[in-house]
Each structure stands twice: as structure tokens, then as C-alpha cells.
Amino acid sequence: CISSFYLDGFIYNGYTSNGSNLERVNVTSGSVDYEILGDNLLDRRDDSELSSSSSEVQVTTDGRYVFSTSYLKSGASYTGFKVRIFDPYDNWNKTDEFYSNITSFYTNGLVADGAYLYFIQWGGNHYIRQIDYNGNIIKNWTSDQATTYIINGQYDYFNDIYWMGQYNASNIYMYGGL
């Protein structure tokens, strides 16, 4: 999975060695270890909890909380999103969890900005779906993915901008607002 975020001197990526930890890189030393979480991460492909090593982890942060998400799929139908919220300032305990009762889609991208989550569809209609932290849909729109190949990114909570990375090259795009 193409998933990572920066928080408090570490880059966390979308890999777990046992389902209840998250690989991280210290940006100063380059050392790699695992943050132990208060609950299991979600498999991004369904709403199951991971219990072994996996890179099928979709995570992001808004600078305060960390989100593990999945798009729910039943047969050929996408049936919603599941969101699990962790508090890194309270021993990484799970603070909340919710389902959205909206149609989901295949996503490799996820951004959070302190008020909303943005699920970024890969392929298809190139949708970005904005939901609040209760699972309510706020807005849908089509991204410029057809020309930029954006796949995932990070909200820069210091500068109030969004950084998005390109799937098939090393370009990084800055957006003033999604």
C-alpha cells in the first residue's frame, strides 16, 4: 500500500509486522523500529483487523490523531468506509471507530486535515470523497489524477496546504485546498 505520514520526528509507513504495530523511521538517525498501538490496524481492503504482517494498511494523520481506514467491499459492491482513530499522545490508544454509510470505492490515498478525511480513488472516476469524523459525506469531486497521477499525500498542518505524490514518477504537487 502507498501510505505514510510524518508525525513528531518520525515517518510512519503502511506496514505492520503483527497487526498492532506500525513501522516508523526516525528522521534524524534513520533508525527503523515499530510503534506499538493500543489496538489492531484495519486491513484497507475490508473491515477486518490485521493480526499478522501486512502492507495493506492505509494510515494518515491530521497532526493530532492517526487514522487507519478501509474501504468496504462485499462482492462487486463497495459498501462504505471504516475508520479507526488512534491517539498518539495517549499511548496510541484507540479513541473512536465508525462506519460511513456511503458508497465507497477502491482507494490508495487518504488525507486528514483536522476536520475531514479525504479518500482518494485510484482510477475509475478519480473521485475525492470528503467525510467528517462521524462518517458523514460532505462533498465529492473529481481530482486531476488523470493528468497528475496523484495517489496519496499529507496535510501540512503547519502551513495549511496539501502535498500529493505522483504514482508513476517523483513529482510532488501542492494544493491550497482539496
Image (tube, helix red, strand yellow):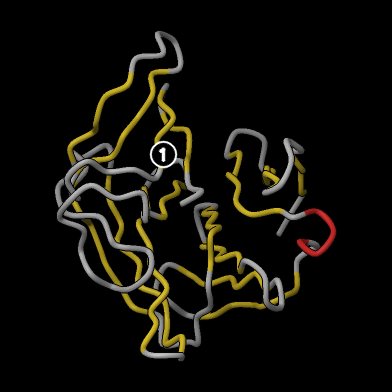
Residue drawn 39% across the image and 82% down it: 73
The residue sitting at 42% across, 82% down in the picture is: 80
Q: Position of residue 107 (x, y in %)?
A: 53, 66
Q: Position of residue 32 (x, y in %)?
A: 32, 21
Q: Position of residue 21 (x, y in %)?
A: 21, 41
Q: Is 162 left or right of 137, judged from the image as shown?
A: right
Residue 178 in the image, given as x and y percentages of width and height: 71, 59
Q: Specify the quadrant of the image occupied by residue 121.
A: bottom right
Residue picked out by circle 1: 13
Specify whether 23 is left or right of 29: left
Query: Quick check: 104 above or below 152?
Result: below
What residue is at 47 percent from the left and 41 percent from the top?
A: 4
Q: Based on the displayed image, in which of its 4 quarters is residue 56 positioned?
A: bottom left
Element at label 1: strand
Q: Which quadrant of the structure image shows residue 16?
A: top left
How many discs mark residues in the rendered view?
1
Report the residue at 27% width, 46% height from top.
Answer: 87
> Does residue 155 appear to the left or right of 50 in the view shown?
right
Q: Amino acid at mark 1?
A: Asn
Q: Is residue 82 above or below residue 33?
A: below
Label 1 crowd (10 A; few <14 / some 14-19 / many >=20): many
Q: Is residue 133 left or right of residue 167?
A: left
Q: Residue furthest right?
A: 147
